[in-house]
Image (cartoon, rainbow, N blue to C red):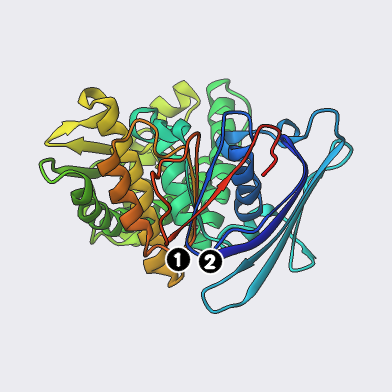
Amino acid sequence: MRIHKIQYENFRNHPFLTFKPDIGINLVYGPNGSGKTSLLEGIHYCALTKGFNNATDNECLLFDSDFFLLESNFISQVESVVTVKVIYTKQREKQIIVNNCDVKPFSRHIGTVPCITFSPAEIVIVNGSPGDRRRFMDNAISQTNRRYLDDLLAYRRVLLQRNTLLFQMRENQRVHPEMLPLWNEHLSRLAASIVYARNQFISVFSVIFNDLYQYFSRNESPFILYRSSIGTIDFDISPFELYSIFLKKCEESKKVEIFRSQTLIGPHRDDLVFQLNGKEIKKYASRGQLRTFLITIKLAQHRYVEKILGDKPLCLFDDIFSELDSSRRDDIFSILETSGQSIITSTENPMKNNVNHISMGQLKRGGER
């Protein structure tokens, strides 16, 4: 998948801008405040329906503007064209229009334009909270598995309703005695499907990740473990076995869950453990190791999506070269040469000389090219 053209109107610091990247590696450089990140964020909106780092729609408006408009054309590996228009105004909710059809809910669009992102703020995937790592897994799997995304959204609704019931039971409010077993069944069925998909994802992703990490460091041994709330699970476990385990765990934790008015077992409490040489990376790694680990995660996600979909996803890499030496930068370029289209931003031009396979462009302050 690649982007052919995107037009920005009143988006961030771009009153009006047209961007037509080349097919391969595109390097956009310029000073802070020139709109490099905004350039990527507009594409991110068109691919994934939202901005970078949980920015709100209103935050993406050009100052004193009442609306923003993004119009884009994507081309798949089989040369089919996908047109995406994003319209936001202060007076009404955001619209996502794909091939001239209004898309609702927005989750239906996820996976249409597979897209891998990198931004410095995403370092929390490696050293942040379990929720940050769950969001990474959910994003990676949702772009390749529509059922997973549907189950995830349904699970969140069931979780909220079950927690409400637990609170009512704690407060001795009148509830039907069969309500909790019913919600246990719903929760366990969805939890089993989600955990099974995550477990299968890690079984494939970790192999890709370990191979890629050797590009950057042959002296370190990385390891990724999926830590489930029901304990260690084998890669060959079946959805039915997981369902049975969740049902049993719900019954065993009933008294404590009622007391706390919280569901204590389920994929909403799972985590990924990242290790280097047998030690947990977020506790012992240097800044350089953390950043290298994150970059490898993103490159591995690209290869995973390509393996599942048979189409190279679009890469949007914001400020990926900061704090990296020239050797590591060259390794990244070497990997990206065969990875389809990528758009990379940098405050400075990291290339001393022009390189044939890299298209370079400069943004000046105010978004001028």
In the displayed structure image, the side of residue 3 where residue 56 appears, left or right: right
In percent of width and height, residue 214 lies at 18, 50
Work out whether mark 1 precedes mark 2 in sequence or the reverse, and give the earlier one.
Answer: 2
Q: Tell me the residue at 55%/43% (across/down).
A: 156
The answer to whether 131 is drawn above or below residue 241 in the figure is above
Q: Which residue is mark 2?
A: 1
State the residue position of label 1. 312
Q: Is residue 208 left or right of residue 1?
A: left
Answer yes or no: do the residues labelled 1 and 2 have beta carbons within 8 Å?
A: yes
Graded by Cα atoms within 10 Å as few (under 14), some (14 to 19) or many (20 or more), the crowding at tag 1 reads many
Count of numbered marks: 2
> What amino acid does circle 2 point to?
Met
* Vertical comparison of 98 with 135: above or below: below
Residue 100 visible, this orientation: yes
Question: Residue at position x 71%, y 33% from top?
Answer: 366
Q: Nearer the viewer, residue 64 or 277?
A: 64
